[in-house]
Image (cartoon, rainbow, N blue to C red):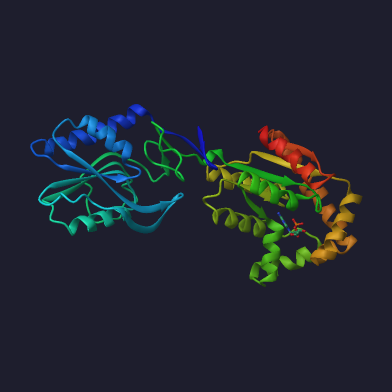
Amino acid sequence: MIQLHDKYFKRFLSEVEVQAAVKSVAKQVAADYKHETPIFVGVLNGAFMFVSDFLKYYQHPCEVSFVKLGSYQGLTSTGIVETLLDLPENIEGRSVIILEDIIDTGRTLKELIHLLSNTNVKEFKIASLFYKAEVYNGEYAIDYFGLKIPDEFIVGYGLDYMELGRNLREVYQLNQKHMINLVLFGKPGAGKGTQAEFLKDNYNLKHISTGDVFRRNMAQNTELGKLAKSYIDRGDLVPDEVTIKMLRDEVEKNPEASGFIFDGFPRTAAQAEALDELLESKDMKINATIALEARDEVLIQRLLERGKISGRTDDQDEEKIRNRFEEYNQKTAPLKEYYEAQNKFHSVNGIGAIDEITMRLAKVIEEL
Ligand code: AMP
């Protein structure tokens, strides 16, 4: 397992497997071109390693040059392709073989084919080390490739994630399992939202507060908002089926997140089970449940203060607050045992300065 910037990657191909694929491309090309002198054109930056090793296996007369186009940014292709370094000038009447590290959607390839079509080459061919056949949607049939690979984001051996990883001898793929998914647990006013703001920046996580999603929907007067309003106004829980569906939608809106902070979810046994099922279906899991603990009297004072600023009606009325505590004691507190049974329950003192509490939470997370 390696980390590049904020993401974790697991080994996908060993150095030996990579070299075997390179050798295979060289052998295929040699079979067709050993009796002439082709010009190999490597596509920068990703193909530099491939070109270098390819040439060591290709022991026949040849020339080499490079071309550079821009298109990738981060994990997904932007679709913007521009020529940064042009084709060599001496290609008229020659056989040109483009050497690519990877062919995925084929957007860069399309641009290369366009560039070559405007020249007087004898012929051109495409040779790629890796080929994502499932996502390639170009018309041009790839002439030579080393290995077909699934549609996973890969790095190493010339390929990068935000410029890191090019110097690796092996190839790695994005590891979804190394996400951190946290449940923040605690009564209303315990500081879940405040702490989530810090954690999400520190660990690059997506914060999902079910209370916030409901309030957003209420402000926009959506169907979901109208439905939730009566429950929220009384300090009751919104029915499980509504909340579970909403949570699932929020998770699915963020397929590239490196982890989630679930704040205010789960609040019932059914929600906890639904969350485990949802995550499991996506090859994810909860890493830790962290409970922020504080006495009711402290919480009531905090909520009443918050209610004055935020205008939240459920924070302004002590009776509603007590009802929310009651809901918590009856339905949410028993989840402690659910997570304890999985060895995932951690308790943190929620009283003190905000940054002191953040430190306590960070300590739990660092030890995971
Ligand atoms: P919160 O902002 O987390 O205190 O949530 C405010 C209100 O939204 C709660 O009192 C509930 O009425 C509703 N709510 C938030 N999360 C849930 C949940 N997981 N299940 C049911 N109701 C929820």
Identify the residue at horizontal 38%, vertical 29% (top origin). 14
Quarter of the image for residue 362 reads top right
- Residue extending farthest to the top is 16
* Quarter containing the C terminus: top right
Q: Position of residue 76 (x, y in %)?
A: 43, 52
- Residue extending farthest to the front is 89
Quarter, ligand 1: bottom right
- Residue extending farthest to the left is 35
Quarter of the image for residue 29 reads top left
Identify the residue at horizontal 60%, vertical 47% (top origin). 204
- Is residue 121 visible in the rendered image? The answer is yes
Left or right position of 172 against 27: right
Numbered circles on residues, count = 0
113, above or below 279, in the image: below
Q: Position of residue 148 (x, y in %)?
A: 31, 41
Identify the residue at horizontal 39%, vertical 32% (top origin). 170
Q: Position of residue 195 (x, y in %)?
A: 73, 48
Q: Position of residue 25 (x, y in %)?
A: 23, 36
- Residue extending farthest to the right is 297
Identify the residue at horizontal 85%, vertical 45% (top origin). 294
Of 275 and 240, which appears nearest the observer? 275
Of 271 and 261, which appears nearest the observer? 261
- Is residue 334 visible in the rendered image? The answer is no
Of 251 and 16, which appears nearest the observer? 16
